Amino acid sequence: MCGAAAAFGLRFGKDRDTFIENPTLGEIIPLLLGIQDRFEDKYSGFLCWDIQNHLYGRSFDFRKPEDEEAFELMQDEVFAKCSGVTADAAGWVVEAILDKEHPELAP
């Protein structure tokens, strides 16, 4: 979600002077809500621990040594699945940007 917000902000955001004149984030918020919906549909949430629970049946709290150890034991699986989540997020963001810029091409 943070990466999506950054990408949308870079593409559709306002410079400082424009934001001071009109401090709304109107174009970005609907796009972010769309990404949030896609996370919730596919991963049962958009926060890391929600996604971890969906993918692994548990989340990891790295303040706890036992969670750190469990993470290390599952490292190959964790990295394989986490990269898929990242790929989904990046694809959804690109799709949202293209749909906004070229609505005539949207399915």
Image (tube, rainbow, N blue to C red):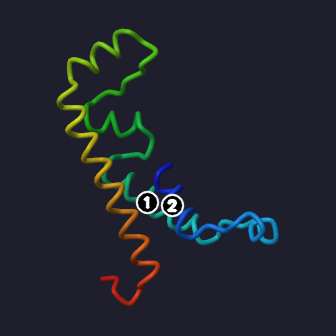
Which picture quadrant has residue 67?
top left
Which residue is at the front of the view, 58 or 69? 69
* Residue that extends furthest to the top in the rendered view of this protein: 65
**22 horizontally vs 62: left or right:** right
* Residue that extends furthest to the right in the rendered view of this protein: 21
Q: Residues within 10 Å of mark 1 (few under 14, many from 20)?
A: many
Helix, strand or loop under label 2: helix
Q: Which residue is mark 2?
A: 32
Which residue is at the front of the view, 95 or 44? 95
Count of numbered badges drawn on the protein: 2
* Residue at image location 39% in from the left, 52% down from the top: 40
CB of mark 2 within 8 Å of CB of mark 1?
yes
Task: Name the amino acid, label 2.
Answer: Leu
CA distance for labels 2 and 1: 5 Å
Residue 76, relative to residue 90: is it above or below?
above
Where is residue 10? Give x, y as percent.
Answer: 55, 63
**76 horizontally vs 105: left or right:** left
Q: Residues within 10 Å of mark 2 (few under 14, many from 20)?
A: some
Where is residue 15? Give x, y as percent.
Answer: 69, 67
Residue 27, relative to residue 41: is it above or below?
below
* Residue at image location 41% in from the left, 85% down from the top: 103
**53 horizontally vs 100: left or right:** left
Task: Name the amino acid, label 1.
Answer: Ile
Residue 35 is marked as 1
Which picture quadrant has residue 61?
top left
Residue 85, relative to residue 5: is it above or below?
above
Where is residue 26? Give x, y as percent.
Answer: 64, 70
* Residue at image location 36% in from the left, 55% down from the top: 89
**17 horizontally vs 91: left or right:** right
* Residue that extends furthest to the bottom in the rendered view of this protein: 104
Which picture quadrant has residue 9?
bottom right
* Residue at image location 66% in from the left, 68% down from the top: 14
